[in-house]
Amino acid sequence: MAVKTADLRHEGDLRFVARTGAGFEIVMDDATGNTGTRPIELLAVAIAGLRPGAGSRDERGRGRRARPETLSSTAMHRAVLA
């Protein structure tokens, strides 16, 4: 199995651009800059996409952070929408 990689570039304030080993770019930002998705949203997407054999079902992920600057823990809820 190949090792998956990603590089992260800081572009100022809380804006970051991640580039995956496959060449895709993902922009992350906070609500003030509002130029990209929030990191907690990406975490929800990543967890929802990990389930093998998802087929054509839709899923919804939800998470919450205690403070905007620090993620010390998170709780995720996953629901399969059939």
Image: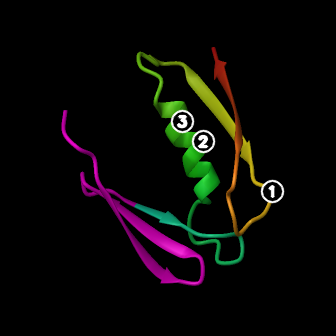
Q: Nearer the viewer, residue 73 or 57?
A: 73
The percent coordinates of residue 21 (x first, y second) are 25, 54
Region rendered in magenta: 1-25
Residue position for label 1: 66
How packed is label 2: few (under 14 Cα within 10 Å), some, or many (20 or more)?
some
Residue at screen point 45% across, 78% down: 10
Q: Nearer the viewer, mark 3 or mark 1?
A: 1
Verify CB contact (< 8 Å) between mark 1 and mark 2.
no
Three-letter amino acid code of the residue under disc 2: Ala
Residue at x 64%, y 77% (from the top left corner): 33
Q: Position of residue 39 (x, y in %)?
A: 59, 57
Residue 12 sits above or below residue 5 on the image:
below
Task: Provide the residue designation for mark 2.
Answer: 44
Check the image and report above or below for 81 versus 24: above
Please tell me which of labels 3 and 1 falls first in the chain.
Answer: 3
Q: Is 74 left, or right, of 12 in this rendering?
A: right
Q: Quick one: SS at disc 1?
A: loop
